[in-house]
Image (tube, rainbow, N blue to C red):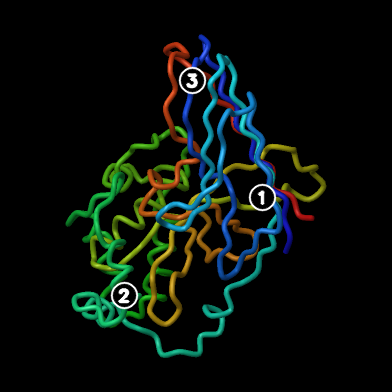
Amino acid sequence: MRYRVRHLTEYKYNKPVSLCYNMTHLLPRDTPSQRCLHHRIQITPTPVYQSEGTDYFGNQTYYFSIQEPHEKLTIDVESYFETGVNELVTSGSMRPTTCGEFRQWLVFPATPELRMVKEYLLDSTLIRRSELLAEYARASFHDDMPVLQATIDFMHKIFQEFTFDPVATTVSTPPEQVLEEKRGVCQDFAHLAIACIRSIGLPARYISGYLETLPPPGVEKLVGADASHAWFSVFIPEFGWVEFDPTNDLMPGEQHIVTAWGRDYADVTPLQGVIFDGGETLALQVSVDVQRV
């Protein structure tokens, strides 16, 4: 499947910004089931300095600085992707690793790969492990259950028991509060799943990207009506990193487009940086359009 994604971000300030330094996580990255064919990024006003790079997690970054007064900042990113299906997961030809086996392997990891995934067992900026979170996940991840099947069951549990509510949470809402209130958005469900899985001793990471949404039959799709999406992945020894989307109760396929991954949302925020002046308030508008080509 081939897609064109346009992500348009506009900031409007109530007073001129005199200087800004920023980094974005809006450029695409290649994965085993995804390849970037082409991308462009346009910043207005024109930056005095700009460069592409790669962060610790291998995500594509874009640094820029603007050194002229401006009351509006526009970041326009257009990317073309080719996506497919992870054949390793669909083949099912290997003996499944159980949760108990995997937990034991992680105590004394025998390979460089296992040693590297242990960082995704630890607390991160927006995710803290706890006994409450472990208790919620423990029934799904008992020792005799294969890791893949356990995670599928847990994803289904979140989908069934939680309500999508775009006004119930903020970016910084902790997973334990989401668990208590049983409401949130895709980012909350991904954070909750990761926090629970780490709390029972298995590695999980956060993924940001896009999901193609299709209008009802006979209804024309609105330009810019899509949105960024979030899901999570779990390291499974026989497959590597396997992705799960608890918001939609499915394992991501061709319609999921990965932008970046990290320990949680704080590692992959679309835009972060420093501005000088600009007043006390700003208006943010984001438009995302995902189209098949």
The residue that mark 3 highlights is 19
The residue labelled by disc 1 is: 213
For image coordinates 74% across by 50% down, the residue present is: 291
Q: Which of the two discs, 3 and 1, labels the residue nearer the N terminus?
A: 3
* Mark 3 or 2, nearer chain start: 3
Give the spatial CA distance, label 1 vs label 2: 36 Å
Q: Where's residue 241, x and y in %?
A: 44, 70
How busy is the neighbourhood of tag 1: few (under 14 within 10 Å), some, or many (20 plus)? some
Q: Nearer the viewer, mark 1 or mark 2?
A: 2
Q: Secondary structure at mark 2?
A: helix
Give how far apart the Cα atoms at labels 3 and 1 are: 37 Å
From the top left corner, tell me how far across and down residue 112 is, in percent.
32, 76
Whether residue 201 is situated above or below residue 162 in the rendered picture: below
Question: Seen from this angle, which residue lies furthest front?
Answer: 48
Q: Is residue 5 left or right of residue 172?
A: right
**Mark nearer the N terminus (1 vs 2):** 2
Residue 40, disc: none
Q: Of the residues shown, which amino acid type is indicated by label 2? A: Leu
Residue type of the residue flagged with mark 1: Thr
Q: Nearer the viewer, residue 85 or 249?
A: 85
Q: In the rendered structure, find residue 114 and report the number of the disc placed on it.
A: 2
The N terminus lies in quadrant:
bottom right
Q: Residues within 10 Å of mark 3 (few under 14, many from 20)?
A: some
- What is the x, y in percent for residue 273? 43, 32
Residue 221 in the image, given as x and y percentages of width and height: 76, 43
